[in-house]
Amino acid sequence: MIGFIYRKIIKPILFKFPADDVHNFFLKTGNYFGRMNFIKSFFNKILTYKNSILSHKVANINFENPVGLAAGFDYDADLIDILPSVGFGFHTIGSVTYLPYGGNPRPMLGRLPKSKSLLVNKGFKSMGIYSVLKKIGKRNKNVIPLGISIGSTNKPYLKIEDMAEDVYNSFVEVLKTDTFDYFELNISCPNLINIENLKEKFDDPIGFSILLNKLSYLNINKPLFIKMHAEKSVTDTIALLEVAKSYKWVTGVTMSNLVKDRKNIYLDKDEVRLAGKGNFSGKPTKELSNNLVTEISRKYKDRFIVIGCGGIFTAEDAYEKIKRGASLVQMITGMVYEGPSVIGKINKDLAKLLKKDGYKNISEAIGVYNK
Ligand SMILES: Cc1cc2nc3c(=O)[nH]c(=O)nc-3n(C[C@H](O)[C@H](O)[C@H](O)COP(=O)(O)O)c2cc1C
């Protein structure tokens, strides 16, 4: 019912306004609602779904359900207090960068409804690590697990070592706090400006090892996931993971980020022709992400935990990633198109699918396709 009202009444109104403004409106309203207990208990009642079949322990963290908000929606940590009442099982803020960056010139967001996709051109808009940590302050830890995605400040660098230092500096600040339950290291933002001149990049094995070597000076004491590209081949992805596997503090990978290729078969040709600068989320990411989840889970099942991300709109989409090897899933675009009630619906339908297949707990279904 709530989903129906969102799709038929609320969404058509929201979609008449620029996507950037609607996103900002949601962040401001969500932040305000997060401070009001009666709104939180109301949302809890109408939006969340709880069932012990969905709860399990991943990387030593308890997750009440496997559906998380991916990095990019709550980039400056406005929704920490409201999201647990919307039904998510975990929540990644960011990507946050060391220095603030106002984002690329607007529009930073666009909609491609026929392609079930969003056009993203934020370029790591961030208040910067100091302001984000100050905003969060002391956090109530009795809610859902919270992670922070860290990327490099969007500015010119003379050499890759300087870029690694920038990421390192963010981790230094984050590690002074006990705010987060896990970290995500974003090496796959496809719309960073100013790095074309660099010989090595974080997403090639040499640049990646420079970054991981630098971070090794720190005591990374919480699980860390690397956010990977969607469009790298399996071979190139494995080349990166062969580097990552010797760093024992790298816990897993999040598969995967946005897509760049405008010839992606799931993009509607007319919508793409009219689309401005940026990269695509949603349905065009799904198959690429699914394929990587399978291949990487198969090869590294004893080494890396996999989080599946890309094109989740239904419980079937989430279940597919889980059966391919994902222990958890993340989403953004499905929530924008289907409304916040979709999180509870995915969880409810996922519980039904698990029961139907005879599982007593979600952990039994992880990677069953690969057995
Ligand atoms: C508006 C928007 C902003 C995003 N910004 C980031 C980001 O800052 N860091 C990141 O790792 N991924 C970012 N992403 C990618 C998402 O985390 C996710 O990988 C991708 O959208 C695929 O998931 P979806 O199809 O459920 O949206 C962004 C996606 C969207 C839609």
Image: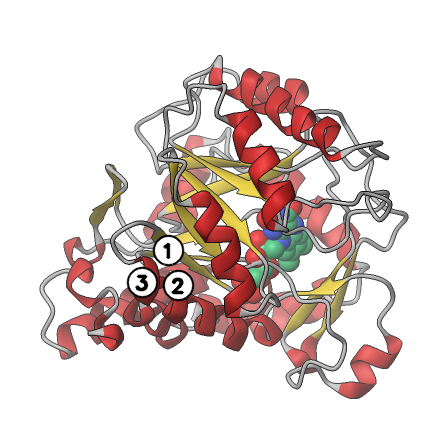
Label 3 vs 1, first from the N-terminus: 1
Which residue is at a point 73% across and 53% down the rendered structure image? 22
User: Does 33 sit above or below residue 8?
Assistant: above
Which mark is drawn over residue 120?
A: none
- Helix, strand or loop under label 2: helix
Left or right side of 283 for 61: left
Left or right side of 9 for 308: left
Q: What residue sits right under mark 1 in the picture?
A: 306
Q: Is disc 1 surrounded by few (<14), some (14 to 19) or many (20+) residues within 10 Å?
A: many
Q: Quadrant of ligand 1?
A: bottom right
Classify residue 154 by image quadrant.
Answer: top right
Label 3 vs 2, first from the N-terminus: 2
Does the residue tagged 1 have its C-beta within 8 Å of any atom of ligand 1?
Answer: no
Foreground of the two, 21 or 33: 21
Task: Choose mark 3 or mark 2, whichever is in front.
Answer: 2
What is the x, y in percent for residue 135?
Answer: 60, 21
Q: Is disc 3 surrounded by few (<14), some (14 to 19) or many (20+) residues within 10 Å?
A: many
Instruction: Give the residue type at disc 2.
Output: Ile
Does the residue tagged 2 have its C-beta within 8 Å of any atom of ligand 1?
Answer: no
Q: What residue sits right under mark 3 in the picture?
A: 347
What is the x, y in percent for residue 242?
Answer: 44, 51
Foreground of the two, 60 or 109: 60
Q: What residue sits right under mark 2 in the picture?
A: 296
Instruction: Give the residue type at disc 1.
Output: Val
Q: Is there CB contact under 8 Å for labels 2 and 1?
A: yes
Instruction: Give the residue type at disc 3.
Output: Asn
**Looking at the rendering, in which quadrant would you find the N terminus?**
bottom left
Task: Choose mark 3 or mark 1, whichever is in front.
Answer: 1
What is the x, y in percent for residue 340?
Answer: 49, 58
Q: Between marks 3 and 1, how big is the CA–CA gap?
A: 19 Å
Residue 122 visible to the viewer: yes
Task: Choose mark 2 or mark 1, whichever is in front.
Answer: 2
